Image (tube, grey):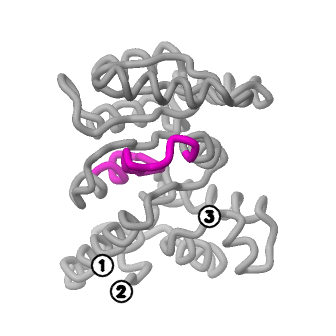
Amino acid sequence: MSERSERDEVARSAGRNEPIRVLIVDDHSLIRRSLELALAAEADIEVVGEASDGQEAVELAERLLPDVVLMDVRMPRKDGIQATRAIKESMPSTRIIMLTASDEEEDLFEAFKAGATGYLLKDVQIDEVPDAVRGVHGGQSFINPAMATKLITEFASISRKEAERPPQLPVPRLTDREMEVLRLVAKGMNNREIAKELFISENTVKNHVRNILEKLQLHSRMEAVVYAVRERLLEIT
């Protein structure tokens, strides 16, 4: 783990009971203001900064160490996907929700490959945003139902395209239970739903997800699903 990542983890551990620190990134001031007002009304959430483009977002994130970033996709200087990739490289534990007008499959897929843990369209009800922030901060993934269908379709396409490709590197071995959890994550289920399905506690689910990510050396649940499909550990039809 890098020195910055270690500092990031220490800061988070020390402030577990503190409000969730949020950075808002959008090139439209009215949208930033609307999000800020919606989040400011929540006692457990604090907006620590705003950025109007991806480059500014990366700079502010490195300085402010937010827990969650609300990130637009289409922006000047550096787009949201490039900014997401840069933030995740320096601060892997920061959660990023793409909040965008783009319903393009390519943007959706590239966002999760870059390390995003949520993808919400801007037609979402504004009062749903705080719950999304809490969810990703707690280890869940959030995605619009319509976009979830597109993501599953993209996974299936990857599986078909690479069906003939032999794995290039030894694949880390997941336990049977970890594979069960991964399959349910791929269906878009959150920790509570997985716990109910498998008759185990939410904390046990969180531990399994953490172990899966550590074994695969990935940063998000969606990255794990993409990896599993690519390496033919998991089939999605």
Dot 1 and dot 2 residues touching (CB under 8 Å): yes
Residue, disc 2: 237
Upstream in sequence: badge 2 or badge 3: 3
Q: Is residue 226 visible?
A: no
Q: Around disc 3, counting alpha carbons within 10 Å, would you say few (fewer than 14), some (14 to 19), or many (20 or more)? A: some
Q: Nearest the camera: 10 or 16?
A: 16
Task: Give residue 39's quadrant in the image.
Answer: top right
Residues under labels 1 and 2: Cα distance?
Answer: 6 Å
- 154 is within the stretch colored magenta: no
Q: Nearest the camera: 94 or 188?
A: 188
User: Looking at the figure, which quarter contains the C terminus?
Assistant: bottom left
Which residue corresponds to the image point at 68% horizontal and 71% vertical from the top-left?
Answer: 193
Task: Give residue 59's quadrant in the image.
Answer: top left
Viewed as shown, does residue 27 lie left or right of 59? Answer: left
* Position of 8 relative to 153 (above/below): above
Upstream in sequence: badge 1 or badge 3: 1
Residues under labels 1 and 3: Cα distance?
Answer: 21 Å
Residue, disc 3: 190
x, y percentage for residue 199?
79, 79
Q: Amino acid at mark 2?
A: Thr
Q: Secondary structure at mark 1?
A: helix
Which residue corresponds to the image point at 20% horizontal and 84% vertical from the top-left?
Answer: 164
x, y percentage for residue 35?
49, 30
Task: Give residue 214's quadrant in the image.
Answer: bottom right
Dot 2 and dot 3 residues touching (CB under 8 Å): no
> What is the number of the mark on residue 169?
none
> What is the number of the mark on residue 156?
1
x, y percentage for residue 78?
22, 27
Dot 1 and dot 3 residues touching (CB under 8 Å): no
Extent of the magenta region: 110-128
Q: Amino acid at mark 3?
A: Asn
Q: Around disc 1, counting alpha carbons within 10 Å, would you say few (fewer than 14), some (14 to 19), or many (20 or more)? A: some
